[in-house]
Amino acid sequence: MSLFALIVALLLEQLRPLSSRKYLYDWLFSYVDYFQHHFNSGEYSHGKTAWWLAVLPMLAGGVLVFWGLYYLHPILAWAFNVVALYLSLGFGQFSHCFTDIQQALRSGKIDEARELLSTLRGRASDELNAEEVARVTIEVSLVALLHHLFGVIVWFVLFSLLGLGGAAGALFYCLCLALRAHWVDDLNALDPGDAQFDGFAREMSARLEWLPIRLTAATFAVVGNFEDTVYCWRSQAALWPDSELGVLLASAAGASGVRLGLPIMQDGARLDRPELGVSDKSNDDALHCTIRLVWRSVVFMLVILFMLTLASLLR
């Protein structure tokens, strides 16, 4: 049933991305901001307490709702999983923008591609040429793939295997991302002194992403160029400023045969970045290779889940 719920949610999210997701995240940020407002005194221990107080009620609530609905009827619990996944997944909006950028580059509409990329990454991209637009688009989309697709799937499956209801796992992962995004990024941009308060949120987010990143990289190796994936993973990932995201980006570059990283112009200055990958594909060819890699990875994960489901039914 968990596999079927995942397939239905993926189809719904691709066919009809949730246009009101912004308002859902606004509510979520208001929720986590409540704990920041009442607990933030710049202490690491206070941030740890606030994190647990924010997470535990939602985590317990998700598990209890799933068990309660399953007690009433398994179909109700299945529907709850579908709804939770539909709210948690968000890669559809990124994949559609990704496709629009690819089409703009293929048509030679570089200004349109830059504008779309600026919307996608949340910062100006006017200084990037066509090749740089393609590279940055791939990098931003791969991070979105982790946060809004593979990470959600991994934690959904883990909670399902533990009998806690996959919905709780998906919501738990999304809430942890929201805590890091709001406490670490937004608040520290205004007050760098909050670094101690957000330390635990950063640590927990890194721990929660450790497994999804490596499972995603391993999937890339299986469905893409295995040797290049392993080489890039081992030799290039640690060179990226964030070594964990470096694992994701380097493995994707090796698996799909594209080149990522390299210096770009940002805010009027040269931003030095290490080179990832061993090939030289760029522009819309690189985007096309990445799209193929992503969808092969999604299909591979669904096949593995189907085999696990079938094995559990035959025991």
Image (cartoon, grey):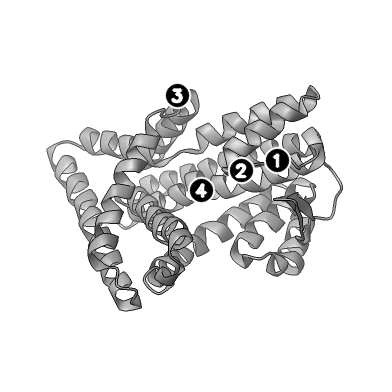
Q: Which residue is mark 4?
A: 150
Using the numbered discs, state the Cα–Cα distance from disc 4 to disc 1 in whole angstroms.
15 Å
Q: CA distance from mark 2 to mark 3?
A: 19 Å
Callout 2–callout 3 Cβ contact below 8 Å: no
Dividing the picture into quadrants, the one containing residue 291 is top right
Say above or below: 9 vs 269. above
- Residue holding disc 2: 141
Indicate the secondary structure of the residue bearing disc 4.
helix
Upstream in the sequence, badge 4 or badge 1?
Answer: 4
The residue at which mark 3 appears reads as 16
Name the one closer to the observer, 301 or 268.
268
Residue type highlighted by circle 4: Phe
- Judge from the rendering whether residue 133 lies leftward or rightward of residue 298; answer left or right: right
Q: Nearer the viewer, residue 185 or 294?
A: 185
Number of marks drawn = 4
Q: Secondary structure at mark 3?
A: loop
Residue 195 image offset from top left, x and y in percent: 43, 71
Say whether marks 1 and 2 touch (CB < 8 Å).
yes
Q: Secondary structure at mark 2?
A: helix
Amino acid on which the number 3 mark rests in the picture: Arg
Q: Could you tell me which residue is drawn at 27 percent across and 33 percent down?
A: 79
| Vertical order, 262 against 199 (above or below) | above
Sequence-wise first label, 1 or 2: 2
Amino acid of disc 2 = Ser
Q: Estimate how packed mark 4 is, as few (under 14), some (14 to 19) or many (20 or more) residues with alpha carbons within 10 Å.
A: many
Label whose residue precedes the other's in the sequence (3 or 4): 3
Left/right placement of residue 8 relative to residue 277 reads: left
